[in-house]
Image: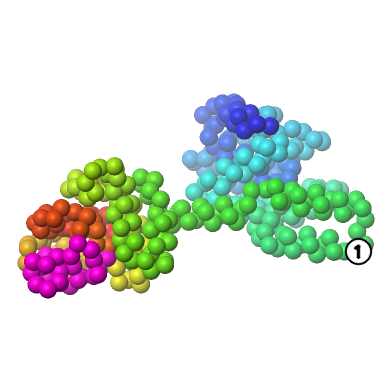
């Protein structure tokens, strides 16, 4: 089944559910975890995860799902989601902001449903398949070990061995949950209001490459402020005053974390306050004292470095900006004020 056809099926189901369409799709994402579904399990998924706004769903959505083109009836009250559709639904489940916790919750519900309700007691292979899938989402390594140990049993018949081969293939074709969640967690720990990727900055800081990280800081700040294509590579006053708080926190937290609290905008703010008395106080004399403290001024009052051997990040408030000393002071104070406003 082509990806376009899969998307069309999903959109058709969403339209069928009207105003509940978006939440109904979320229910479909949840229903994709089990190998197969019966109406009772689908009902449990709805009442456990979709009784409260904004994802509140009426019971009628259960019927809409089971009678939709997303799944087919393979036995009396037993339904299977088409493989290509199931794979897409699971991928979309990974995109939830609470994906890690929600996946564990669904897998736990599936395990407990099989364990305590025993709906497939007369279908041992299906029952084991459901539990193995749940275990794979809870602990992939343990699921693989369970398969390895069971297959090593010399008393297995041909049919049982074929089942294990099929289940191993089933698990291998599922989305790599651990990788997807790791990627998502990485993205979540580096949030940006403007879609800026802070991975390279993080990696440079983690490697202790401070000068390169300083240059990357200017680059990502220009991107976050929409000035990366400007001829002059500095932040103007307007971009400082409106710099996205989320991005400012991300940049600062990375510097503070990987420098063990030595570097970062929030650290500079504390140093400025120690010489100025308050964050928005400014004067050339204060700038001089600040420059001495952070190592941006060397060999007397009028010698300011074009690159920093002192406190970092340097570029947004130093060489990357206009050379006029007064302009530097104003822009640094505005940045420190923005730091205070954003509660960095």
Left or right position of 273 against 123: left
Q: Which stretch is magenta?
A: 286-312
Spot occupied by residue 107 in the image (x, y as percentages of width and height):
65, 53
Query: Residue 76, relative to residue 154: is it above or below?
Result: above
Which residue is painted at 71% across and 39% down in the image?
83
Say which residue label 1 marks. Answer: 154
Please indicate, yes or no, whether residue 277 appears anywhere in the rendered image: no
Figure quadrant of the N terminus:
top right
Of 223 and 252, the residue lying toward us:
223
Of 28 and 202, the residue lying toward us:
202
Please indicate, yes or no, whether residue 250 appears anywhere in the rendered image: yes
Which residue is painted at 38% across and 48% down in the image?
196
* Residue 61 lies in quadrant: top right
Spot occupied by residue 320 in the image (x, y as percentages of width and height):
22, 55
Figure quadrant of the C terminus:
bottom left
Left or right position of 155 against 302: right
Left or right position of 316 against 16: left
**Few, some or many C-alpha atoms within 10 Å of disc 1 (few <14, some 14-19, many ≥20)?**
few
Query: Residue 128, relative to residue 30: is it above or below?
Result: below
Of 36 and 281, the residue lying toward us:
281
Spot occupied by residue 120 in the image (x, y as percentages of width and height):
81, 47
Q: What sort of colour scheme is used for the picture?
A: rainbow
Magenta span: chief secondary structure: loop
Which residue is painted at 12% across and 73% down in the image?
299
């Amino acid at each position: 089944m082509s990806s376009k056809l899969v998307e069309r099926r999903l959109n058709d189901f969403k339209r069928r559910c009207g105003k509940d369409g978006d939440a109904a799709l979320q229910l479909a994402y949840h229903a994709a975890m089990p190998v197969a579904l019966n109406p009772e399990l689908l009902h449990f998924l709805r009442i456990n995860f979709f009784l409260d706004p904004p994802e509140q769903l009426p019971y009628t959505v259960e019927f809409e799902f089971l009678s939709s083109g997303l799944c087919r009836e393979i036995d009396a009250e037993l339904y299977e989601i088409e493989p290509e559709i199931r794979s897409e639904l699971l991928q979309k489940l990974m995109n939830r902001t609470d994906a890690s916790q929600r996946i564990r919750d669904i897998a736990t519900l599936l395990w407990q449903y099989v364990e305590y309700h025993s709906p497939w007691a007369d279908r041992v292979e299906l029952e084991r398949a459901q539990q193995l899938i749940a275990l794979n989402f809870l602990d992939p390594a343990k699921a693989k070990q369970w398969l390895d140990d069971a297959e090593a049993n010399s008393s297995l018949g041909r049919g049982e061995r074929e089942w294990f081969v099929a289940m191993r293939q089933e698990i291998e074709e599922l989305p790599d949950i651990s990788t997807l969640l790791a990627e998502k967690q990485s993205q979540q720990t580096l949030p940006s209001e403007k879609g800026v990727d802070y991975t390279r900055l993080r990696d440079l800081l983690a490697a202790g490459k401070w000068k390169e990280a300083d240059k990357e800081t200017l680059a990502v700040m220009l991107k976050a402020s929409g000035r990366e294509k400007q001829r002059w590579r500095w932040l103007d006053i307007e971009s400082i005053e409106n710099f996205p708080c989320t991005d400012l926190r991300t940049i600062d937290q990375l510097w503070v974390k990987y420098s063990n609290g030595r570097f970062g905008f929030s650290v500079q703010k504390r140093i400025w306050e120690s010489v100025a008395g308050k964050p928005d106080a400014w004067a050339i004399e204060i700038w001089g004292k600040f420059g001495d403290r952070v190592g941006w001024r060397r060999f007397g009052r009028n010698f300011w470095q074009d690159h920093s051997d002192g406190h970092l990040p340097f570029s947004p408030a130093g060489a990357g900006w206009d050379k006029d000393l007064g302009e530097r002071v104003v822009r640094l104070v505005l940045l420190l004020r923005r730091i205070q406003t954003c509660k960095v």
